[in-house]
Structure formats: C-alpha cells, structure tokens
Image (cartoon, grey):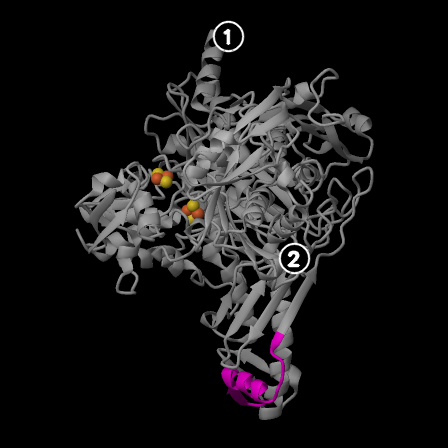
Amino acid sequence: MLVTLTVNGSLRSAEVDSAASLLTLLRTGLGLTGTKQGCGNGECGACTVLLDGEPVNSCLVFAAQCEGREVLTIEGLSESGELDSIQRAFADAGAVQCGFCTPGMIMSGKALLMRNPRPTREEIAEAISGNLCRCTGYVKIIDALEVVAKQGPVEGS
Amino acid sequence: MGQNALHPSGAVGAPVRRVDADDKVTGRARYLDDIVLPGMAHAALVFPGVPHANVRGVDDTRARSVEGFVATVTAADIPGENQVGCVDRDQPLLAGERVRYSGDAVAITVAESPTAAREAARAVALDLEELEGVFDAEKALMPDAPRVHEGDNAYLQYRVHRGDVDRGFDEADVIVERTFRTNYQEHSYLEPLGALAVPEDGGTITVYGTMQCPYYVQKAVAGVLGIPLARVRIVQTVTGGGFGGKEDVPNEICACAAVAAWRTGRPVKLVHTREEDFYRSSKRHPMVVRYKLGATRDGRFTAADITIIADAGAYSTLTPVVLFRSVAHATGPYEIPNVRTDGYGVYTNRQTTGAFRGFGQPQTIFADESVIDEIADTLGIDPIEIRLANCLAVGKRTATGQLLEESVGLPETLEVARDESGWLAKRAGESARAGSDGRAEPGGASRPRERFLRGIGVGAIYYGVSLGAKGLALDASGAHLNLYRDGSLRIAVGGTEMGQGLLTVLSQMASDVLGIPVASVHVDHVDTSVVPDSGPSVASRTTLMTGNAVIGAATKIRRTLAGVASGELGGAPDEVRFEKGRALSNGKSIGIEELAELCWVRNINTAEEGWYAAPESTFDDNGQGDAYAVYSFATQIAEVEVDSRTGEVHVLRMTAAHDVGRVLNPVTLEGQLQGGVLQGVGMALYESMKTDGGVILTPDFSTYILPTSLDTPEISCHAIEAPYSKGPFGAKGIGETPAMPGAVAIANAVAHATGMRFTELPITAEAVRLRLAQEETA
Ligand code: FES
Ligand code: FES
C-alpha cells in the first residue's frame, strides 16, 4: 500500500506492506536509516521518532496509521547541516558511546524539552526511561539534556 | 572526575571530543543494517526448536513456495569445512547431524526480504530424533549424565596450586567457606548481531559486520568457504556495542551470510531479531564457585581453596580463555601464600557462554569479596582495612607467583574510594543518623527493623590486561599510518571501535607524537585487507596494543619529518620538537604541512607500519608463571537502601576508583566507568536470563530486565595513575574493570544494611522479601 505523510517537513510517499511499521517505512521505504531498531518490540526506544510532536516507538506504530501525519526523525534535526542544540550537547558532554541508542535518546529528549523546557534531572531521567542505553550508564545523557535545558527553549516548544 | 593526574600539554589526557560524535548524533553513522546494496538478498536461520537431537532430514519443499524464496543452504552446501569452533574445533556452522542447543542453526534460508526469509525458515521441515539433554553444569558432571559431545562433559580444567594449603588452613584462626552461584548475564548491546556478505571479482568475498574481532571472522569465513585468507576481506561497520558479546559470535553469523552469498552469488544480509540474538549469542557464564578462605586473628590471609564450575553451554567457544582468567584471578587482588584453585569447564545443552566484560572474573569476585567481608566481620576488622592489609602492591606476588614490579595502584584505589565515599562514618552508621530522615542507620539488622535500611559495601579487583598465557596465540597488533602531502593523517588499525572511544584516543596519540591537531587525523574502522592480523579487540588490550602500534608508526614518520626539518632549519634531527602543527628546531619552525609537501616533492615515504607484540606470558601445569603482562586495579564502594517491605534494593551512590595507568581522555574514561558501573548494578540486582530446557524464558527486554535511567545511582569516578612503562603514554586497559567490582560491592552493602548475606546473584526484590520472611518466622 502507498502511504503519504510529512517527514521532516517534506511530503513523502512510500510503498509498504500493510503490516509494516513506521520504522520499516522510514528505514526501508524512505532510506532514513538514522532511526534504529534495537528490539522491534517497543522495549528499547532506539526507534523513537516524533509523531505529530509526540514521542513514539516507531516499531510499534503501523505505517498505515501515519497517512497524512507529521513525523520528525533524527535526520530532521540537522537538515541545515548544523547540529541542533541537543545534538551538540550530546556530542560535547560525552553522551555518545556506541551511538546506537543516540538517535532515539535525542528524540525523546527533544520531546521532553518541547513540552517542558525546564525539566529537573528527575524529570529528564523519567522522560528517557523508555530508552535503553547499555554503554553510558545514562549519566552523561542526563547531563547533556540538562545543559540544553539551561540554554533556553528548544525549537518546537 | 577526581584525578591525581599528571596533566600533559597535548591532546593525550585532554577531554577531546569524540571524533565519531557528529556522525552518531545526526544518524549519519552507518551501522550494518543501514547498508543496502543492489541485488541484496536476506537470510534467516532455521532453528531446531529442541535443544538436543539427531538430525535425520531437512525438507524445504514448503519453503520453496514462499513468495520471494531464493535458496535453502544446508550443511551439505558448505564448500569448505563445516566448523567455526574458535579455540576447540567442536562447533559446526550448521548442525547437519546433531543439534546441541536450541540456538543451533540447522539450515539457512535466503529470500528477497527479511520477512520472506523468516517465513521460509519456519516452513522448512526438520526430521529430528530428540535426545535427552542436560541443562545444569553440576548435573552434567554426573557419570550418567547425557553427553553433549563425544568425550566427558567436563572437558576443560585449569588449576593454580601454590604453597601448602592444608598447612595454611592449620595456621588460620578463622575459616569461612561458602558456595556462590551466578546466572547467565546477557550483553544486551543495543545493536543486534548482523552481517552482509558480498561475493566479489576474482573469487573474493567481502563481509561487513558488527564485530569486535575481524581477524577471527576472516579465519572462520575462509574456513567454511574453503578459500585462502587472501580472498577474504572483513570490514567492521560502526558497531553498536560489544562488551565481549561480539567477540566470537560474529564468526558464526558472518560465516552464515558468507555461505549463503557464495551459494546464491548475491550479496546476502543476515540480521538477528532481538529474540534470535538472545538464542544465538554467548553470555556471561553461569558459575558455581565454592570458596574457602582462612585468616589469622589479625586479619592475614593464610590459605584459599577454590573450586569453579563454569557452564560452557553446547560448545567450547571462548570458555578456555575465560576460565583461565577466572582461575588465574580467583583469589582476588591479594597476596595469599597457599592457594588451591581448580576450575572446570562443562558442556551442557544450553546457550553458549563466552566473553563478557570482566571475562570470567565477576563471578569469582562475587565469591572472594563476599567471603573476605565475612572474615572481616568475624574478626571485627574494617573491610577496607583487611583488604589493605593483604592487597597486592609493588614487590608482592600474585597467586600465580608473578612478581609485580610496577604500576600497582590498588592500595590507592582502596584509600581514595574509602575517603571519597565517606566510608568510615557511613560504615559506623553516623551519617545516616546525622541526616536522620526517619531512616535507619547502616548495620540496622542488629536493631529492630525499620522499613528502609541503609548500608555501604566495598569490592576490590585486579585484571590482567591483554590475552595472557592461555590466550589464542597471537598477541600483537598492527597499524598503518599515511601522512598525506597536506599534513593530514589517515590511520588504519587492527583494533576495533565498539563504542569505547578507541578512534578518539588513537587520534589523540598520533596528534601528540606528530604535533598535528586531532582534526587532521582520521582513523578508519578495521579492514582486514589493510592491516595484518592484529588479534582480537578484547580483554582491555586494544588501547594498549593498538595504541603502541600507532605510536610506533607515528614515531617513524616523525623521524622522517625530523630529518627533513633539521635540513631546513638546522639543528640535530633528534632535537626537533613537534607542537601545534609545527616542527621546531634551532630557534626556527616550519609547518607540518610544508614538511609533508617537501617529502612528497623529494620522493620521501611518509607512510609507515607499526607493530607491537605483548611481552611474553607463562603458565605452567600448576598455574605458576607470569600470567599477564600487567594488571589494572579498581575499588568500588556501593551505598544502598533496602526497602524491607518490598524487598527492593536501591543503589544510592557508587564510588569508583580505578588505576588506569594514565588517563588518556577523562571524558571517555568517565563514560566507560559510568557505563560499567551500571552493568554491575544490573548484574547485582536485575539481570538473569532464565531458561527451561531449551527454552529461554526471558528472550526480550520486557522480561530480561536491564537498568534504566531511573536506576542510575549517583556515580563518583576517580582515576588513579600508576603508569605502566610499556603502555601508550603509561596507560593500561580500562575496558573491563568498570563492570567488575560493583556487583559484589552492592551485595556487601546489602549485607551491611540487612545483616543478610546473599550467595546468589541477582539479589532481586523477591529474593530479599523471601529471606526477610524466613528470618521473621525463624
Ligand atoms: S526498536 Fe522500537 S522500541 Fe526497540
Ligand atoms: S551509547 Fe551505546 S547504547 Fe547508548
């Protein structure tokens, strides 16, 4: 089936299986491989994207449900070629190791900062608790998001 | 990070930003599954569904009618040897005759999409004659237990025997003996295993994959295809975590993809789902450790008697290397004059076990550090004092009789962890009382029980860096450096980046040797066609070995540049200094780019090879010798709060003091420490892969519980620098140690809080509740 939706601000269409997930649509249908699959079961958060501004595990959302809706992926954060403030903070704070959780973490962080520009450390930890990271112990990820929160509102909030 | 550092002036030691950070935060970094090639097909594995069986037939009739079906590959289609055993040659790539565990692959299906390949795999009919299996290492030792292979299930034995153990126990005033058990721990790297094999011109094949040890893979692929190593090229893709789990298992998955690609003539990708990954990948060995330790009244250890039974699973894989390490280090980082350690590797019909951060040691550490605390309690000696009184130091000997001549920062890690954590006050219970918020003070077990009990505990460890005496033969590493005419440097190495920050620290090292900015350096992921066999990236050996190889090659290039610079500027070549992009001599200077251009114009070679071989290690029949070149040391202190109503253990704070030789990059180091600490928390409290016969009961992240951001305690990291003269800039490996002392520190803290000693990990809320209830009825 053909699904048409807005991805990172552009209207895109892709032919997918009726049972395909949004994750498959993004990765296989549109070649947007920045969004990762760590489990395919809604348990790791590596596939997190924003659907109409809300964070979702894209592996659990049917592509068919996304017709006409708006999706923001990791690729949409630095379209100008410049890192956005969250990406920069992750890189500067040492919040990235193997990097496989990173796109999903950044999208969860983005969603948090859009709805709550001044989160506490506890609120940050809560917001990313659905995103597993096996490398960092989360400390520097929370540090990075705290840095961004202190810089003022992020785009989209 | 607290750091007693010698702060160097250049890039080494500075908090240099990761060189791969931008690729990773933008989603540009290409992991295995992100690569798509024209004409690519997809593979899936045919699983047996039972753990032990003879294979009588494989029928793919129904699979052929699956839309998009391309081919079925069975053991008979393997052109070379059907064998991927890494140390022992006991593991067929495809289980053509006999299934030995539920993760064995009997055949491979290839189709146009991953979904079709899996559908075809499920449609393959297997004719299996089921056999009785054995699912417990201790039961596997019984004479009438089903045999997993031809010989005894107890197929492997190592020992360390030193002094006179019986006399040592005679001299002891107190003896403690306990049996400890640990279960499977899953690596849970976020990126599942995957490979992409591409048949290429000239009868060659290139295999891309997520892996730690490309040279192991090269050998495995050449073996199953029956072609020379020169026709096999392995390229490591950006790797989403390894922790030991991508050490040998990629041999199997890459070999499967290679066989399927060879058979079909097409690029073939094979990527595991998380559940397949649970079934196929190796784990931390479940171990039973019987531990007996004696000490004199004043707290001197006199003798240790230790038996280790390690469940190897269905195939030997890396068990020989891992068990050697368990046995060599079983006494912990202490000088004990009389030691008898016997370790057994045992086959079962269960998931295979291999390398996992800590490499066979966290299990024995759980035993030794628990028993030491019990001895300290019995004698009324502070746990840190008793460790300081017995611990290794320069001039002392390890259990294998190795004399430690340098770089032993252990006593300092104990002292720093003690002082930074506020140990003395907390151990005595003062701090909890002072901050009285209605919560009980530590050691609360002796008083009427409050709901929340606080405790503090310690664990100390040592870790032999690199492969050691029982590693696979090659313990050397290569590098190829090419300084271009514009002064930029490209580095190819044989050691792998899997998230730990290798590319960054290598860039820092080369930058310091040549005086060029880190931004002028690019380090590639491993390509086996560029750098000679460099052994595996395991055992915390990579920074040490690869770092020295890079420094060696960079030094050769510097010598060349120095010659040219002294010709241009005057002064002696060996007095030329390289700083901030310039060569300085005779009061004048010249840019490195200019020097590189001059070399190019004058036909002077500026590409060099580096090669570093580890110092020799030895291990005789009694386990005596210089087992490892050098050791890393660490102490971690845990502070916990136990909810006596729910049984939940909450880790409040971890203090980690690690002797790393020399800090190369404080940010990547701290990141490694924090990540390792949380893996220790997972091992202590949550992580346990449960099985029943051939079935994994916890094959996903909703049943196999990993620590999340909500479980992260406050982590206070401290680097101790006891430089190693043969290490790159004095550094030793840091990969493993962060994940090692934490679990037992937590167990010891729980014992301090509740008065209850646990001899099994993880200490789940359920286990605590059960014990509390037992105590109440008692
Ligand atoms: S891949 Fe979607 S939650 Fe793990
Ligand atoms: S950086 Fe590796 S999983 Fe988070």
**Residues tagged by mark 2 and mark 1 found on one chain of the structure:** yes
Q: Amino acid at mark 1?
A: Ala
The residue that disc 2 covers is B534
Comparing B335 with B33, the one in front is B33
Residue B591 in magenta stretch: yes
Q: Residues within 10 Å of mark 1 (few under 14, many from 20)?
A: few
Q: Secondary structure at mark 1?
A: loop
Is residue B123 visible to us here? yes
Instruction: State which region is magenta.
Output: B586-607
Q: Residue B538, image x and y in percent? A: 61, 49
Q: Is residue B238 left or right of residue B391?
A: left
Q: Residue B102, image x and y in percent? A: 56, 27
Q: CA distance from mark 2 to mark 1?
A: 59 Å
Q: Is residue B3 left or right of residue B650?
A: right
Residue B705 in magenta stretch: no
Q: Is residue B625 left or right of residue B289?
A: right
The chain holding disc 1 is B
Across the whole image, how many numbered discs are drawn on residues? 2
Q: Residues within 10 Å of mark 2 (few under 14, many from 20)?
A: many
Q: Amino acid at mark 2?
A: Ser
The chain holding disc 2 is B
The residue that disc 1 covers is B778
Image: B673 above or below B762: below
Task: Write the residue at 44% across / 19% down.
Answer: B766
Q: Residue B690, image x and y in percent? A: 51, 24
Sooner in the amino-acid sequence: mark 2 or mark 1 = 2
Q: Secondary structure at mark 2?
A: loop
Task: Write the residue at 50% across / 28% down.
Answer: B688
Comparing B753 with B275, the one in front is B275
Q: Quadrant of residue B463?
A: top right
Image: B30 above or below B245: below
Comparing B684 with B103, the one in front is B103
